Amino acid sequence: MAAQIGRRLRKGAATTAVAAAAVAALSASQAPGATVDGEGRSTTADSQPTPDVSADDSATGNSPYYTDLPPLNSPTPSPTTSSTVAPGAGGTESGIPATVLDAYKRAASRLNASKPGCNLPWELLAAIGKVESGQARGGRVDANGTTITPILGPQLDGNGFALIKDTDNGAYDGNSAYDQAVGPMQFIPSTWAWAGQDGNDDGLKDPNNIYDAALASAHYLCRFGWDLSSQGDLDRAILSYNNSTDYLNTVLSWLEYYRKGAHEIPDGTGSLPGNRSDTPRGEQRPPRKPSTPTPSPSPSTDKPGREPQLPIPGRPTAPPTGTPSTPTDTVHHLEDAGTAELTATAGDAFAETISTRAETRSGQAVGKVRVRFTITGDTDATFTGGENVATVLTDASGVAVTPTLRAGEKTGTFTVRATVVGRSVAGVDYTATVTARTADALARVGEGALVCPAGGEFAEQVQVKATYRGAAADGVAATATLIRSADDPSQNDKGPYFKDAAGDAVRTLDGLQTDANGLLVLPKLYADDTAGTFLLRVTTEGGATLTVELTVEAAASPTPTEPTTETSATATPSASPSA
């Protein structure tokens, strides 16, 4: 949540001096690689906010955040992960509610398994969770990790905050006029729409659930191939969450604090920070009703009861009404910048990238504008890094080029939509097509004759190698059929056969697929009592065909033997003539 948006002048020089001294002392003692400027603020190399970054190009919309700093003394090192420490033991601020802590650790583990190059520490999620929601308001979550009551930031109506009109029809924040940051990690609805995750595997993506929100934060911080073990990438990731140097330094301070030790406490017993970036230290801003938009004050009058919006030293005043303040304000439309046909085989990278040009009404190029590319449709295609959203800055010629697009395993068409971040102009849609893996040649592995006696089984299984342009063709769908003849590819009703799971004869197998080496090993073949020469035909996506000859030999007739007769050795006496 943003320090820069809606910041008020601090009341009282003493309060300001104390706050600056605290930041300076903490920065000098804890923030890695930090220095302190003349006003007591810590700064980090390559960590300054980007002035033309729109609020809706951050996770939180640059909403307010808790500014309380960790104690200067180091927390007691963590006990064993299976133990629970009583509230206050080892330092109150180092205690993290059990369910919230589990969500952070689980999210980091899942993220690092899928993107090991990011090197995301769970302590970073804890640091962000601390400044965004006070560890989900001290652990007030149910057994499933959902906040007991909604956590909403102020409505982003431009009245002391960024102006982000409603993007979700109030689905997440209950506000159909303006967006509000939602949940433990304070995502604005437009960001959650593409960054949301299901962290507890319940089939839902709920920004009010700490498991879902923590995993979404992990993926958000690790997009663009950032390596968070690098200070530069770590700073960029945090600033992308909320574009404020004060926010960066606060998160880094909590990150360092939790790295030195943190322990588990029961849910609901955590301490809640007391100061927010939009409130003078020690005061509390009463929550505004999310359902009632607050109109902006007239330029000539101040709203009763509200501090005048005085210029902040070092910040340029707003330009006169109607004058574009950023390059984004001058964009009238987007144009395709010569993108070629987007086609790729399943599992392969698209050879072409998408190019979009931002232009003024008169067709002039607009540089330094952020263009968001979003993959939509029934597809598992992603940009490099495994994300389905990429935000790219236009160059001097007004062109933004996407990272490499990689096809998944799902075939068919999908859409990549290009939109301008921070400006409502018509987007440009690009259609991409993923085709099935193909093979242009099949060859049998092995040269021996395939022979079987009638009523028996073939000793050797048929093995086939699929290739495409000479290289092994993996994942290619194939079908094997015992056919009648070379001229009649219909299924035979006699001769060799396969067996199904029930042991019944089948003569067509579909749904087969080559392995990573392009190899296909067919199940064992059996023969009925019909002797002769038969054909097995294997076909694949792409039209490759192989015909294999099978021989069934007639069963050998039994050798006839001479019948054996026994001759009695005893003669039958003849009858004597009667006397």
Image (tube, helix red, strand yellow):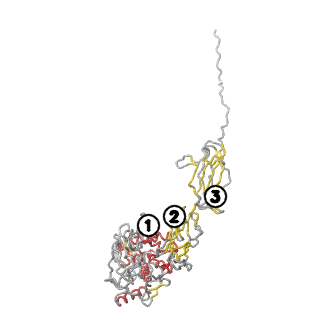
Image quadrant containing the C terminus: top right
Q: Which quadrant of the view contains residue 78?
A: bottom left
Callouts 2 and 3 close, C-beta under 8 Å: no
> Distance of mark 1 from mark 2, alpha carbons?
18 Å
Which residue is label 3 attached to?
465
Dot in front, 1 or 2: 2
User: Dot 3: within a 10 Å radius of its alpha carbon, few (fewer than 14), some, or many (20 or more) residues?
Assistant: many
Q: Local crowd at mark 1 within 10 Å, few (<14), some, or many (≥20)?
A: some
- Neighbourhood count class around disc 2 (C-alpha, 10 Å): few under 14, some 14–19, many 20 upward: some
Residue 270 percent coordinates (x, y): 35, 75
Q: Which residue is mark 1?
A: 198
Tell me which label, 1 or 2, sits earlier in the chain: 1
Q: Name the mark nearer the viewer: 2 or 3.
A: 2
Q: Nearer the viewer, residue 277 or 549?
A: 277
For the point 62% across and 58% down, which residue is it?
542
Please indicate, yes or no, whether residue 208 appears anywhere in the rendered image. Answer: no
